Structure formats: C-alpha cells, structure tokens
Image (cartoon, rainbow, N blue to C red):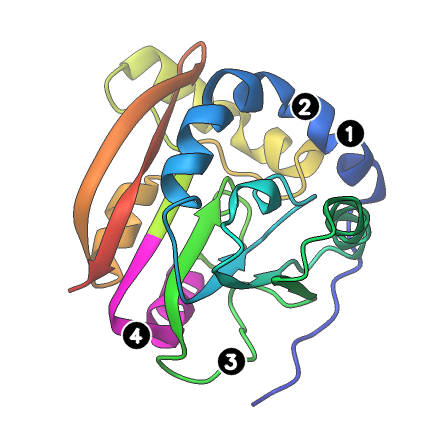
C-alpha cells in the first residue's frame, strides 16, 4: 500500500469546529449518531472522524478504526478519545481517498459530515467500497445541495468558492446521495433533515450494489 500524504491541516477551523457544528449536534446528533453508530458490530472504519463527535456513540463490542487527514482535527480527536477512555477505538492519519487498509476488511464504513470536504468524492467513495465487506454497510450523515429550492440551491452554488476557503474545503452544493449511488452503493434507507435555513441533510444506510 502507498503511504498516504500528510495534510498540512486547518488549525483555526479545527479550533472552531465543535462550536460551528454545535447546533447540528444538539438538534440532530443525539438522534442520528446513535442510530448510525450505535447499531454497529464487528470491525468499523470511520472516515474523516474530525474531532471525534461520533466516538461516544460506538458500542464497546465494535472494533473501531477512525481516520482523519487533518493533524489539528486529529489532535483534538485524540484528546476526546483519552477523555472517553475508549480502548475499542484507534486513530490513524489518512485521507478518505487513500485508505491504508486491505480490501473487504471492514464490516461497516461510517461517514459523518465529511464527504462535503474530500477533494475527490468519487475516489473516496470507491475506497469506502473497496475496504467494505460485500455484506457490509456504508452509514452516512451529510449535508447536501438543496435541489428542492431553485433559490437556495443557487445560493449554495454561488457561495461554494468562498465557503470552500473558509470551511476547510467544504462544498455546500454537493449531491452526495447521487454520488453514493453512482459509486455502486444501493441505498437501503435514507431520511432527510433540515440542518439550517436552505440546507438539507441526509442520513441513512447503503450497501454495496
């Protein structure tokens, strides 16, 4: 396997991330995360773990490997992991597009508010499918482009160049569910939520098609 390149990271975004995402965590995280992370068993890979908001929701029976490319996010995730004392979770620095794991080696792959930021979304999803067992699940929670509103969808398109710069690469106008299906996954179930004015989110479970 090729050794993943080390990312320079976004120091200030990492420092503010938990505060920025606080509203979504308060209103939706307590419902979404237990449903997506709390039901897993076996070997689990979380891509783009960020500051570790998911860690408290994984059952101790799961063997969790969490990856994060940003060194400043990773540092905060390590602190959270130490506070939790969760020995069933291990951390690695690696991008979603270049996972240092064998084919079909995980029972579940988890993606939580990260696919908006990966530079190469098709490649990241191809990697998730590669390391997932044929009977495994891909569990996702992401914000997506508003295709139900011409106005809000247009706003997302207009602000994307600036938003990418201030938001550590975040694309607010990605059609992530479509990308998941185009990567060869079959959506088992999906639900939509309103994360912010004009900003829909989706969460659900998919399996290799």
Q: Which mark is residue 16?
A: 1
Residues at circles 2 and 3 in contact by the CB criterion of under 8 Å: no
Q: Dot 4 lies on which element?
A: strand
Q: Is the N terminus in the top left, top right, bottom left or bottom right quadrant?
A: bottom right
The answer for how far apart the CA atoms under marks 2 and 3 are is 31 Å
Q: Which residue is mark 2?
A: 20
Residue at 73% x, 55% y is 70
The answer for how far apart the CA atoms under marks 2 and 4 are is 34 Å
Q: Which residue is mark 3?
A: 101
Q: Which residue is mark 4?
A: 133
Residues at circles 2 and 1 in contact by the CB criterion of under 8 Å: yes
The answer for how far apart the CA atoms under marks 3 and 4 are is 12 Å
Q: Is the C terminus in the top left, top right, bottom left or bottom right quadrant?
A: bottom left
Q: Position of residue 13 (x, y in %)?
A: 76, 36
- Precedes in sequence: disc 2 or disc 3: 2
Q: Position of residue 94 (x, y in %)?
A: 64, 68
- Precedes in sequence: disc 2 or disc 4: 2
Residue 25 seen in the current view = yes
What residue span does the magenta drawing correspond to? 122-138
Residue 142 seen in the current view = no
Residues at circles 3 and 1 in contact by the CB criterion of under 8 Å: no
The answer for how far apart the CA atoms under marks 3 and 1 are is 30 Å
């Amino acid at each position: 396997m090729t050794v993943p390149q080390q990312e320079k990271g976004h120091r200030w975004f990492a420092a503010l991330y938990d505060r920025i995402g606080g509203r979504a965590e308060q209103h939706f995280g307590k419902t979404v995360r237990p449903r997506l992370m709390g039901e897993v068993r076996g070997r689990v890979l979380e891509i783009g773990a960020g500051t570790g908001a998911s860690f408290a929701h994984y059952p101790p029976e799961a063997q969790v490997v969490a990856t994060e490319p940003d060194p400043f996010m990773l540092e905060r995730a390590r602190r959270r992991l130490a506070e939790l004392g969760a020995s069933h979770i291990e951390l690695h620095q690696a991008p979603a597009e270049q996972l240092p794991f064998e084919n079909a080696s995980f029972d579940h792959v988890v993606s939580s508010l990260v696919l908006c930021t990966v530079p190469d979304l098709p490649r990241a999803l191809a990697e998730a499918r590669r390391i997932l067992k044929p009977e495994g699940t891909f569990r996702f929670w992401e914000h997506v482009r508003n295709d139900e509103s011409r106005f809000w969808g247009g706003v997302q398109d207009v602000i994307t160049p600036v938003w990418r710069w201030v938001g550590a690469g975040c694309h607010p106008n990605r059609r992530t569910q479509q990308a998941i299906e185009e990567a060869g996954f079959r959506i088992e179930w999906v639900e939509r939520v309103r994360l912010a004015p004009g900003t829909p989110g989706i969460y659900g479970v998919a399996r290799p098609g």
